[in-house]
């Protein structure tokens, strides 16, 4: 009896094995298999030119086209020919278990579904979500002659198309639909890319070698690059890369350090849970390297070098060098500065691919060796209108740098120009100028800096007038001994200032009508090497000078006044030799109150504030 049962089981098994290829191939030939395949999870579309099977679950397919669309992602696959093993019993438990897949001639397409693309799926979302999820398992997946990879609609990344010849050496992964967990145990492959979207240098291929894993997570719970926290592995790349960016480097979004451009790339990246680890290094060279930093945009012939070294105080180091470059302000893209030898450097303790959250412990700096601003009017936006000073024409040279270390900012910037035309309180003057700005103890986020040992110097000043010319060789300088600067448009400055000038001649020509005949006040022109002090504060469009004290060579001036865009108001005491008087200034017009009056003025103006 037992022997007969055994024989019967063998006969049944042989019958199934003999019947399977007939039934399965009939289903394939009649199109029924294609219909059944398209009933799979999510919105799946599958077709093939020809297919056949002999052993249960083992299929040979030619001309396979596969497309899956979820509410968030689209995935497409084209395979010229291949073999695959599918667990037929797993399908009964809503599990797609694919093993020992070998594909030849492959194109891969991936796109993040935009809101417009995915909106039509909303009507069926309730019915779809009502169905239980499917589990998809892939193991021992191999592919050769991978000829095209297309990636679209990723946030912050240009669309990419890679054409070449690649190999998928191994893939093992699993995913549960309906927002379930996914993981990639290992994905290893390489590709020689001969053509990239946007690449100008088609003769330089790009070689990429990837070996990575992705830890278990639920993709719906992590958006954009936040998914990179689950990535580990290595990536090697060498060759011409069509677009390296825009890539954000530093773990501090406020510093706005990014790069983009086409060029020669050589990289070895070691990633662990989304963090670049020691031994990682990258070099990139481009004739059109675009770099943003702080509020500036630079483009030029340059290089990027980045590395992670365990022995450094700050393991992450990034250096960007531009030989010849032009700079625009962020968002304008219109260059105002041309220069050479721009260097941007940054250091950090960690570089996380998924986060730019600031920890306040990094370092950043930039330095311009030589720069030129062809239109000096660019600087007018930093000068408060109440100063009555505007650049009209000319150019300027600039150099200097700026750094932030552990959140504290400092910098030294020099600007100079020759034969520059300015408007001072409505009068045109020509002069050479030099500005030295020494910033320290600053906070870039609030744009507040200490201003110390800074200066503004004018040389060879001439006041434009058909009636009278100023003597040649006039100079004047203000030294900002100590103060505070708010970096905005226009600057807000409060400072203790030392004043020095050859004489007061240009000031008289600026504030006094040169067509009027000479008066007693013109004797002031004989006072040489004038020196003085003042406390100045500019805020919300107004400049307040309180106090001003000049005491040199028989000339003494004590004053307090405020300047706005349209007017000037204040009080003034002036003494020259033995003659003194005090004045009231109302709406830019001085009115003599009386002779003498020093004691009365000092009751209103506190000179002891200079020593506070």
Image (cartoon, rainbow, N blue to C red):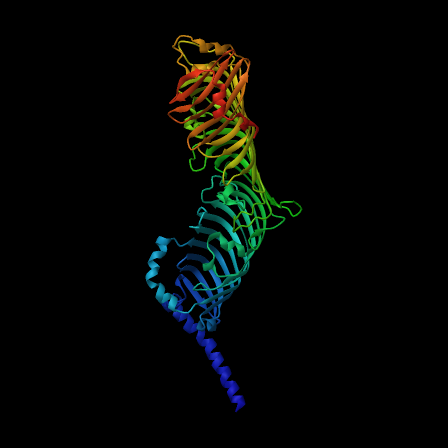
- Quarter of the image for residue 609 reads top right
Nearest the eye: 87 or 528: 528
Spot occupied by residue 254 in the image (x, y as percentages of width and height): 50, 43
216 displayed left or right of 428: right
Instruction: Say above or below: 457 vs 137.
Output: above
Instruction: Say above or below: 419 vs 47.
Output: above
Nearest the eye: 608 or 334: 608
Q: How many marks?
A: 0
Residue 367 in view, yes or no: no
Q: Residue furthest right?
A: 311
Instruction: Say above or below: 268 vs 141.
Output: above
Instruction: Say above or below: 30 vs 322.
Output: below
Nearest the eye: 383 or 559: 559
Quadrant of the image for the C terminus? Answer: top right
Spot occupied by residue 225 in the image (x, y as percentages of width and height): 49, 52
Spot occupied by residue 396 in the image (x, y as percentages of width and height): 49, 24
Q: Residue furthest bottom?
A: 1
Q: Which residue is drawn at 47% across and 55% down?
A: 106
Residue 28 in view, yes or no: yes
- Quarter of the image for residue 567 reads top left
Spot occupied by residue 312 in the image (x, y as percentages of width and height): 65, 45
Nearest the eye: 57 or 506: 506
């Amino acid at each position: 009896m037992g022997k007969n049962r055994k024989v019967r089981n063998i006969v049944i098994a042989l019958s199934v094995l003999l019947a399977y290829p007939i039934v399965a191939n009939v289903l394939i030939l009649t199109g029924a298999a294609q219909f059944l395949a398209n009933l799979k999870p999510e919105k799946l579309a599958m077709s093939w030119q020809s297919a056949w099977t002999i052993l249960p679950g083992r299929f040979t397919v030619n001309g396979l086209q596969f497309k899956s669309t979820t509410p968030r992602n689209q995935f497409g696959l084209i395979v010229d020919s291949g073999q695959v093993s599918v667990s037929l019993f797993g399908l009964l438990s809503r599990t797609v278990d694919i093993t020992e897949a070998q594909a030849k001639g492959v194109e891969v397409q991936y796109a993040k579904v935009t809101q417009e693309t995915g909106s039509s799926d909303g009507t069926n979302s309730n019915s779809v979500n009502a169905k239980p999820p499917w589990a998809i398992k892939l193991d021992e997946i191999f592919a050769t002659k991978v000829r095209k990879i297309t990636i679209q609609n990723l946030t912050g990344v240009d669309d990419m198309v890679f054409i070449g010849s690649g190999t998928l050496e191994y893939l093992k992964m699993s995913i549960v639909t309906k927002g379930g967990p996914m993981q990639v145990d290992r994905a290893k492959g390489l590709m020689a890319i001969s053509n990239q979207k946007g690449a100008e240098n088609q003769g330089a291929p790009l070689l990429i070698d990837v070996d990575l894993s992705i830890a278990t997570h639920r993709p719906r719970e992590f958006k954009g690059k936040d998914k990179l926290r689950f990535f580990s592995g290595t990536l090697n790349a060498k060759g011409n890369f069509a677009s390296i960016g825009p890539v954000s480097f530093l773990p501090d979004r406020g510093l706005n350090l990014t790069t983009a451009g086409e060029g020669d790339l050589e990289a070895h990246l070691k990633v662990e849970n989304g963090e670049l680890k020691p031994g990682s290094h990258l070099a990139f060279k481009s004739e059109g390297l675009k770099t943003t930093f702080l509020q500036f945009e630079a483009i030029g012939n340059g290089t990027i070098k980045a590395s992670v070294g365990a022995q450094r105080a700050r393991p992450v180091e990034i250096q960007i060098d531009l030989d010849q470059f032009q700079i625009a302000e962020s968002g304008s893209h219109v260059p105002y500065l041309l220069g050479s030898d721009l260097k941007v450097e940054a250091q950090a303790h960690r570089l996380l691919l998924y986060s730019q959250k600031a920890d306040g412990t990094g370092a950043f700096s930039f330095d311009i060796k030589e720069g030129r601003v062809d239109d000096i009017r660019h600087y007018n936006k930093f000068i408060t209108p109440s100063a009555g000073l505007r650049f009209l024409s000319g150019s300027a040279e600039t150099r200097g740098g700026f750094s932030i270390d552990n959140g504290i900012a400092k910098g030294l910037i020099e600007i100079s120009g020759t034969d520059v035309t300015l408007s001072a309180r409505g009068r045109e003057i020509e002069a050479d100028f030099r500005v030295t700005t020494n910033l320290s103890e600053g906070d870039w986020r609030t744009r507040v800096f200490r201003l110390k040992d800074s200066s503004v110097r004018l040389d060879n000043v001439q006041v434009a007038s058909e009636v009278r010319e100023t003597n040649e060789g006039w100079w004047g300088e203000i030294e900002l001994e100590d103060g505070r600067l708010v970096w905005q448009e226009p600057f807000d400055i409060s400072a203790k200032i030392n004043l020095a000038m050859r004489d007061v001649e240009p000031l008289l020509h600026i504030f006094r009508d040169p067509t009027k005949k000479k008066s007693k006040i013109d004797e002031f022109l004989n006072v040489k090497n004038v020196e003085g002090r003042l406390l100045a504060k500019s805020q919300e469009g107004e400049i307040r000078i309180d106090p001003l004290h000049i005491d040199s060579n028989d000339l003494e001036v004590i004053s307090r006044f405020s300047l706005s865009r349209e007017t000037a108001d204040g009080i003034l005491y002036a003494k020259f030799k033995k003659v003194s008087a005090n004045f009231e200034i109302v709406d830019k017009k001085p009115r003599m109150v009386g002779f003498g009056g020093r004691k009365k003025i000092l009751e209103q103006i506190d000179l002891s504030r200079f020593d506070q």
